[in-house]
Image: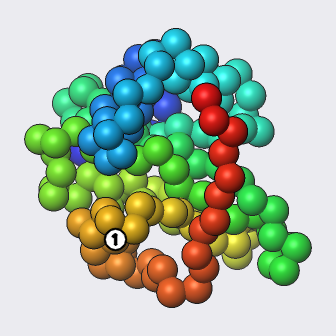
Amino acid sequence: MITVRSAVLDDAISIIEFQLKMALETEGMHLDFQTVKKGVHAVFKDATKGAYYVAVDDDNVVGSLMTTYEWSDWRCGTVIWIQSVYIIPSHRGQGVYKNMYEHIQSLVTPESSYRGIRLYVDKTNHPAQRVYEKLGMNGEHYQVFEWMLST
């Protein structure tokens, strides 16, 4: 049975490995281990940067995601961004992400300061887009633009 919980520092190595695999799988990028390690640990050290959640099956971490926060003056509340989603291949298509999404969704209540959930997805990642649509999300409203410092 899959359970979803807030990640703890002991989960960091799994999260780091997942990020390295995701970058290679989705964008063909080989990320620097030490950079990713420092980035993951920075989130654990500073909760304003975000939070990690993990999906666990029989004490094995089988998926993770990170949430970050965007202040919305239009909604006078915080929008949760889901990022860095990775599910190990053997557990894909089994509802692991759905469980994780529903966990995050449960944080958004009229009593909380959270007003909704957003995420971005690569334009070519059609399987992920279908999963997000099936969960009731839509990609019709915004297009993301970016500029990144070359490393």
Residue at the spot of label 1: 129
Q: Quadrant of residue 107?
A: bottom right
In terms of depth relative to the viewer, which is nearer, 91 or 99? 91
Tell me where residue 81 sits by quadrant.
bottom right
Residue drawn at (68%, 52%) of the image: 147
Q: How many marks?
A: 1
Residue farthest along the left direction in this orientation: 90
Nearest the camera: 93 or 99?
A: 93
10 Å crowding of disc 1: few (<14), some (14-19), many (20+): some
Left or right: residue 75 compared with residue 7: right
126 or 108: which is nearer to us?
126
| Amino acid on which disc 1 is placed | Gln
In this picture, residue 111 sits left or right of residue 58: right
Residue 25 visible in the shown view: yes
Indicate whether 100 appears above or below 31.
Answer: below
Image coordinates for residue 30, horizontal then vertical, percent: 38, 28
Secondary element type, mark 1? helix
Q: Is residue 10 above or below residue 109?
A: above
Q: Give the residue displayed 44% in from the left and 26% down from the top.
A: 31
Quadrant location of the N terminus?
Answer: top left
131 lies above or below 147: below
Residue 100 percent location from the top left of the image: 39, 53
Residue 55 appearing in the image: no
Which residue appears at 49% of the width and 31% of the height? 7
Q: Position of residue 122 (x, y in %)?
A: 41, 61
Considering depth in this image, is 133 or 21 the residue closer to the camera?
Answer: 21
Judged from this view, the residue extending furthest toward the front is: 150
> Which quadrant is home to the C terminus?
top right
Quarter occupied by residue 50: top right
Residue at 45 percent across and 16 percent down: it is 33
